[in-house]
Amino acid sequence: MRIGVLTSGGDCPGLNAVIRSVVHRAVVDHGDEVIGFHDGWKGLLECDYRKLDLDAVGGILALGGTILGSSRVQPAHLVGGVERAKGHVADLGLDAIIPIGGEGTLKAANLLSEAGLPIVGVPKTIDNDIASTDVTFGFDTAVTVATEALDRLKTTAESHQRVLVVEVMGRHTGWIALHSGMAAGAHAVVVPERPFDIDELTARVGARFEDGKRFAIVVVAEGAKPLEGSSMDFKTAGTDIYGHERFTGVANQLSVELERRLGKEARPVILGHVQRGGTPTAYDRVLATRFGWHAVEAVHRGEFGMLTALRGTDIVMVPLAEAVETLKTVPEERYAEAQSVL
Ligand code: F6P
């Protein structure tokens, strides 16, 4: 068989582990040929690729980023993009494509699958918001990085009797905020699923100082917003060149507001892309490796239009169409559980 693999969307620790696993299973065990498209769907649209053999994937298991490069280009965004992708798959004699990506990539994969291409998707995102899988690789690494940062920030916050408002990634969902906040014992967690009440948040942080504590750590997901009609002015940062909302501001705005209301020094800390860079944790390497292995097996069974997913401890296949329907958001019970132990 001839299989094409690509990584698309925001990078994520564990992508290289998937690529390596696909090559090991396909080339070594099945005698397949694997090619890797450069920079996501862009590589397929421009026929820009390279052959992937064992040498090409040697030593990449623990490497962050993606050896293939990534981009946010999607076939449907370009005039004639879907037809061009189909044409290149035929010209290159590909029997299957394994796109590794998050929400946007999987939507594109589903569209191409519906257009007749043989696709088996692999989910990835540090945000952990893909509904069909219990966990996505990259999430554990991002939570570990954020937790280490929060642990460090506690000592400087305490020295200066400050409020630190720490912004973590999570455009639509607050999984990284929730888990890192719980793991580090932060004092408040603010997630996009639950617009925050600035009066309630101020009271919560203020109560710590009234209790004689010297500092407070607030973890806020980048996509969090105040309640409609809230007494806090809130500005979003416009859109990027793809028309996606920019998230560069909630920690700044919250820290200014909390400082003003509490009369305590407050500082914003934006962790940003450090959460996505560098080596994946052991958990993420194993999950990514299993996804790659099972994607190749699905290709050999001819199970197209499907996505690898973790359910409990098993890897199962779920329809791509189902996977792109909704996002997995933080449920109210998980939020309440965290609030009571922060
Ligand atoms: O979806 C993964 C993610 O890291 C989000 O948490 C974040 O909002 C976004 O990507 C950032 O994307 P970019 O790298 O394009 O700034």
Image: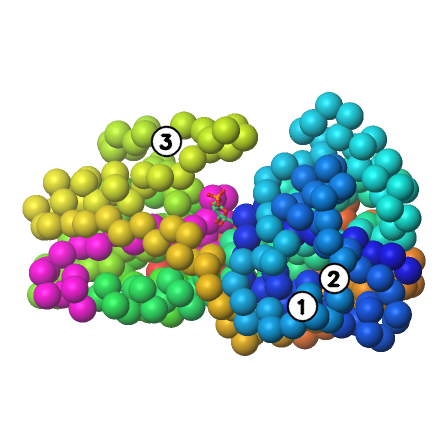
Q: Amino acid at mark 3?
A: Ala
Give the CA separation, mark 1 to mark 2.
Answer: 7 Å
Give the CA separation, mark 1 to mark 3.
Answer: 39 Å
Q: Is residue 45 above or below residue 61?
A: above
Find residue 298 and report its image quarter: bottom right
From the image, which quarter does the C terminus lie in?
bottom left
Locate residue 245, reporting x and y percent.
46, 33
Q: Which residue is mark 1?
A: 57
Of the image marks 1 and 3, the number of the one nearer the N terminus: 1
Which stretch is magenta? 155-177
Q: Amino acid at mark 1?
A: Val
Q: Which residue is mark 3?
A: 237
* Label 1 close to label 2 by CB (< 8 Å): yes
- Asked if residue 130 shows in the view, the reply is no
Q: Which residue is mark 2?
A: 52
Of the image marks 1 and 2, the number of the one nearer the N terminus: 2
Residue at point 88%, 71% (across, down): 30
In the drawing, does residue 284 fall left or right of residue 156?
A: right
CA neighbours of label 2 inside 10 A, class few (<14), some (14 to 19), many (20+): many
